[in-house]
Image: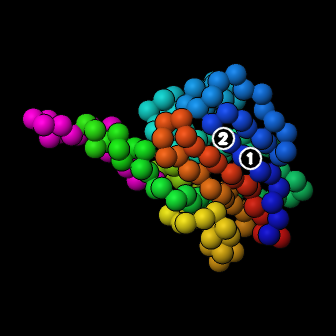
């Protein structure tokens, strides 16, 4: 396997292929800033939860990088984290209150962490493997990636435990 591009996003920085992308905002506002600067044409972004926004922005920035040689388009999305969709789970639970037992359907859809892989696959027409794993460490993901058949994949760690507490480290990986 060969890594061709990588991105690391924290709540205050973005490093794409070893080069920092200058940002003015932090946290959730930084994700919106990146969307407006580099994407801008997918209004559904504003309905997404923070985990989905994080993965979506990371994927957008990675997949805009030029492919090397005769590489095929990405045919798999393999992501993982430790906390599943905990941030959105808490937000969803908060909509259930005494006397109001009808929680928000708009938040419900994002109580599944694999929604981020679906958002990426839909946006980029990826019809192969799309998986989201809940693991203890990012290193455990390497064994899963090695055992998953694909020609090319967008893979990595995508963690969001609070609106302004997130981390992503994704790569494009090609099987030679």
Q: Quadrant of residue 156?
A: bottom right
Q: Is residue 25 left or right of residue 174?
A: left
Question: As drawn, which residue projects farthest toward the right?
Answer: 69
Comparing 49 with 64, the one in front is: 49
51, above or below 69, in the image: above
Q: Which mark is residue 7?
A: 1
Q: How is the image coloured?
A: rainbow
Q: Can you identify the residue that label 2 sits on?
A: 10
Structural crowding at the residue carrying mark 2, measured as other residues with C-alpha within 10 Å and reported as few (<14), some (14–19) or many (≥20): some
Which percent across, then down, holds residue 96?
21, 40
Residue range highlighted in magenta? 96-113
Q: Which mark is residue 139?
A: none
Contact between marks 1 and 2 (CB within 8 A): the answer is: no
Which percent across, then down, holds residue 173?
75, 61
Q: Residue at x 48, y 55 (%)?
A: 83
Which percent across, then down, holds residue 132?
52, 61
Tell which tag, 1 or 2, sits nearer the viewer. 2
157, above or below 47, in the image: below
Q: Is residue 60 magenta?
A: no
Q: Main secondary structure of the magenta part?
A: loop
Element marked by disc 2 = loop
Any part of residue 32 in sight: no
Q: Residue at x 83, y 55 (%)?
A: 4
Q: Residue at x 67, y 33 (%)?
A: 12
Q: Is residue 111 magenta?
A: yes
Question: As drawn, which residue projects farthest toward the bottom?
Answer: 147
Q: Is residue 44 left or right of residue 171?
A: left
- Spatial CA distance of label 1 from label 2 is 10 Å
16, above or below 69, in the image: above
Quarter of the picture containing the C terminus is: bottom right
87, above or below 135, in the image: above
């Amino acid at each position: 396997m060969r890594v061709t591009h990588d991105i690391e996003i924290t709540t205050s920085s973005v490093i794409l292929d070893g080069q920092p992308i200058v940002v003015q905002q932090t946290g959730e506002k930084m994700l919106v800033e990146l969307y407006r600067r580099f994407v801008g044409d997918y209004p559904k972004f504003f309905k997404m939860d923070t985990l989905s926004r994080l993965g979506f922005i990371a994927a957008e920035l990675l997949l805009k990088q030029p492919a090397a040689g005769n590489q095929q388009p990405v045919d798999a999305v393999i992501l993982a984290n430790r906390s599943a969709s905990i941030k959105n789970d808490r937000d969803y639970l908060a909509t259930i209150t005494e006397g109001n037992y009808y929680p928000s359907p708009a938040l419900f859809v994002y109580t599944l962490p694999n929604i981020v892989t679906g958002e990426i696959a839909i946006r980029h027409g990826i019809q192969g493997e799309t998986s989201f794993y809940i693991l203890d460490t990012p290193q455990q993901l390497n064994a899963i990636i090695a055992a998953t058949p694909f020609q090319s994949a967008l893979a990595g760690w995508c963690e969001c435990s609070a609106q302004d507490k997130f981390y992503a480290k994704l790569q494009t990986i090609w099987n030679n």
